[in-house]
């Protein structure tokens, strides 16, 4: 029987993904796996739309870190993976900068060939740490 790696993320409203750890907390640091553009019912949001998918990935990220007791200001590194033409990268990045009110933590924006779900064009992972 497939079971999620962490029941707490399900309680936070994130989609169930079998044999998948959403995050691992080590002391004051939270290492976050790639957040995908799926809603709480596990539906892929806005197939092929980099703006809507970036927003959903970040919504999932913010939900996840809040569940672990962190805040948006504790995010210190992002990696944004984007499938498709250069314009998709620009569009996804625009959504990221808007979600951070133009104050994005250090980030890497990468163009990739494909991601885990059909019609998924954005995925975002992060390193999160509370200040001392």
Image (tube, helix red, strand yellow):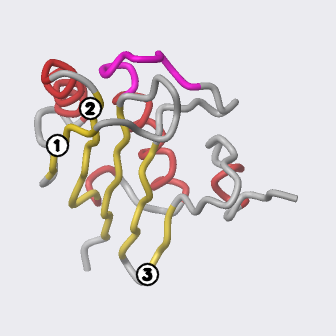
Q: Is residue 60 left or right of residue 43?
A: left
Mark 1 or 3, nearer chain start: 3
Q: Nearer the viewer, mark 1 or mark 3?
A: 1
| Magenta stretch: dominant secondary structure | loop
Q: Kindly give the residue lying farthest to the right in the view shown.
A: 1
Quadrant holding the C terminus:
bottom left
Mark 1 or 2, nearer chain start: 2
Q: Which mark is residue 27?
A: none
Q: In terms of secondary structure, where does tag 2 sit?
A: helix
Mark 3 or 2, nearer chain start: 3
| Front in this rendered view, residue 47 or 52 | 47
Q: Residues within 10 Å of mark 2 (few under 14, many from 20)?
A: some
- Cα separation, mark 3 vs mark 2, equals 26 Å
Q: Nearer the viewer, mark 1 or mark 2?
A: 1
Q: Where is mark 1, residue-wise?
A: 109
Range of magenta residues? 44-53
Q: Up-down: is 57 above or below 125?
A: above
Q: Where is mark 2, residue-wise?
A: 99
Q: In terms of secondary structure, where does tag 3 sit?
A: strand
Residue 48 on the magenta segment:
yes
Q: Where is mark 3, residue-wise?
A: 26
């Amino acid at each position: 029987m497939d079971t999620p790696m962490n029941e707490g993320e399900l309680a936070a409203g994130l989609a169930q993904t079998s044999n998948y750890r959403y995050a691992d907390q080590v002391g004051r640091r939270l290492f976050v796996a790639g957040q995908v553009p799926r809603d709480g019912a596990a539906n892929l949001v806005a197939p092929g739309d980099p703006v809507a998918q970036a927003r959903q990935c970040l919504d999932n990220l913010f939900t996840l870190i809040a569940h672990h007791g962190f805040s948006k200001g504790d995010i210190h590194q992002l990696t944004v993976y984007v499938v498709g033409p250069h314009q998709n990268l620009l569009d996804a990045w625009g959504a990221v900068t808007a979600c951070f009110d133009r104050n994005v933590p250090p980030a890497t924006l990468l163009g990739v060939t494909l991601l885990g779900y059909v019609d998924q064009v954005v995925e975002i992972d992060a390193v999160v740490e509370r200040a001392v």
